[in-house]
Image: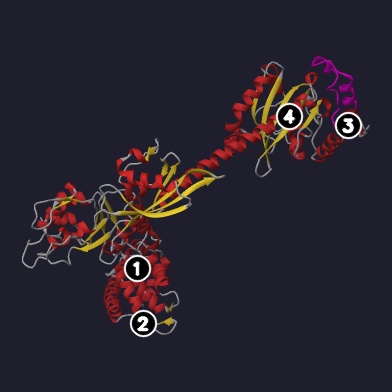
Amino acid sequence: MKPINSYRKKSEYYETTDKDKFLTKNWLNFFKKGINLGGIRPVIMASWQRSLKYEIDPNVMIAPTLCDNKEIAERIESNKTLLNLIRPFMDDLYEMVKGTDSIIAFSDKEGVVLELFGDSEIAMTAASVNFKVGINMSEQAIGTNSIGTSIVLGKAIQVVGAEHYCVAWHTSHCSSAPIKDPYSGNIIGTITLIGYLHSAHPHSLGLVKTASDTIARLIEQNSIKKEQYLIDNFFNAALDSISDGILIVNRLGEIIRSNKIATHLLKFPLLDHCKNKLDEIEQLLPLSRYLDDSTKRNEIILQDEISLSEEKYKLFMTSRKIIVEDEYLGNIIILRKKFSKEINKLTAKYRFSSLVGEDPSFKTAINLAAKAARTDRSILIIGESGTGKELFAQAIHNESLRQNEPFLAINCAAIPKDLITSELFGYVEGAFTNAAKGGRKGKFEVANGGTIFLDEIGDMPLELQAHLLRVLEEKEITPVGSHISKPIDIRIIAATNKDLFQLVKENKFRLDLFYRLNVISIQIPSLKKRKQDIDLFIKHFLPSKEFSTGVLTYIYEYNWPGNLREFRNVMEQIEIFCEETFVTEEYIPDYIRTELQELDDSTTLYQSLANETRKDTMIATLKNSGSVSQAAKRLGVSSSTLYRWASEYHINIKDYIKTNG
């Protein structure tokens, strides 16, 4: 151990007291002679003994362990949230001790100092012994000190003068308190007050204890704010994911929270930044009157039907009173549109969760569709026949604000050309021969408020395209035989397996309608481009069956021109005819086996021709080469590959290699 002589000029720093001299004497005896005079606090002596085990030199005058700039930056980043929270508090704390030759320091849970506030003179003195941002004050690095020892003990401690393990800190006092996570109880840092030895005071320890407790409360309050933010945002997301309309009304009849479905059902924009009073909104007067009546009753939960002004439909309403400690605070109201029997049939049953597939292009289509569902724009779905265009349309409808309204699918290619106008837009009595008495509503009027899915839009006659364009632009329909237009609120989702732009060039489709429909376009990949999903489909359709290698070969190599519709049909056929668990090739439809066999035959012929061409090229190259390596180089292959080819084609290389003799 190096000689200890650092105390000779100690009086230059401060005036020593009897207590200082006593501590210094004990320190010298323990570290120079190995004698414990018994005058050191047990908690300090225990720390000294731990420090000795770490083989730290107690004579050091400058702290030896500083983190490099990269590590400092990483530690500050990992403690960024805590630092941002406590910096204003540390600034206020420093203002309390400013002018007293003091430093306020924050360290992370491992004792590395990450923030300092201090008077200039003592800060310079501290920096001269490396006490600055990045110093490691753990016991393992620098021995007994308030920062490292408080982390070991898990409680606040004051270390004065020669109680420090290293000579470098003997002219100072320091008090540290660990900062603990208020939820887990784990130490997440320390707060420390440092000063010259002559200014040591017991109140310093109380100050850092109070500071530590205050920081813990700040953390708790910040966590509560974050939790409330999470709850509020989750609550809003949950409200908007519910298929019913939700209103929360206070005792004054003011709407304090609502979801988008409620806005849609009530046909009124409910604003987040102000409270809408029910009795001040004409459309909501029936609801207001109902609530006034309901608050006078004793029932907690009420159910009834209400009719809104200027709306032909009724709303089925469930209202629950909010009562806390016998005090009425308001109501939670659930609104659901009451449909007629006719409309109840016009529903969409598929959701995005119904769509099976992991192929990236398919998942991209789902993501686009989910985003499009949240708008009210027209959508064009493009895909081959059988790819599931209507499933996508239904999923979009069920994720939209119109999910409680009708969904009606129309195949434009299936309706006779002379009937399609009356089918879509309806007709009045006497519009044509055999017209029904009283006329008939068209599909668009039946589905008013909801979604119309126009499949095979490319097959719609040109004259009808003009009518559809007018509906999209004017938002009204005119029944056949009538001169009176009817307003409608409808969303159009169209689908096609044709190139509409090519049809525009061929004057078979209107360009203006194309742009009207193609506001958002979604491309659904064909099954031949989704081969990685076939295993999922097999498990989906026939989870209890096992397939032979031959069957799987057919399934994976076949191109499935009918896409999922054809695939499902084949799976159903196998399920009907194959009574065993293990499926063999005989259950694959004949047309699939025939097509793949023809493909194999054509491939075999091609391969035969290719092999003959390669053989002829090889022989010609060998004849014009002086060595195997030269021939291989000309053919662009390795010598070993050339020998393998020669073996396959039964060629004796020596018979063809050109000799220089």
Residue beneath disc 1: 659
Residue 202 x, y percent position in the rendering: 79, 25
Residue 342 x, y percent position in the rendering: 26, 64
Which class describes the residues within 10 Å of circle 4: few (<14), some (14-19), or many (20+)? Answer: many
- The residue depicted at 40 percent of the width and 37 percent of the height is 275
Front: mark 4 or 1: 4
First along the sequence among labels 4 and 1: 4
User: Is residue 414 shown left or right of residue 322?
Assistant: left
Q: In this view of the protein, which residue sits in the foreground, 444 or 339?
A: 339
First along the sequence among labels 1 and 3: 3
**Distance between the alpha carbons at the discs numbered 3 and 4:** 23 Å
Residue beneath disc 3: 40
Residue beneath disc 2: 576
Task: Report the magenta residues as a range.
Answer: 1-25
**Distance between the alpha carbons at the discs numbered 4 and 1:** 82 Å
User: Is residue 430 shown left or right of residue 201?
Assistant: left
**Distance between the alpha carbons at the discs numbered 4 and 2:** 82 Å
Identified by mark 2, the residue type is: Ile
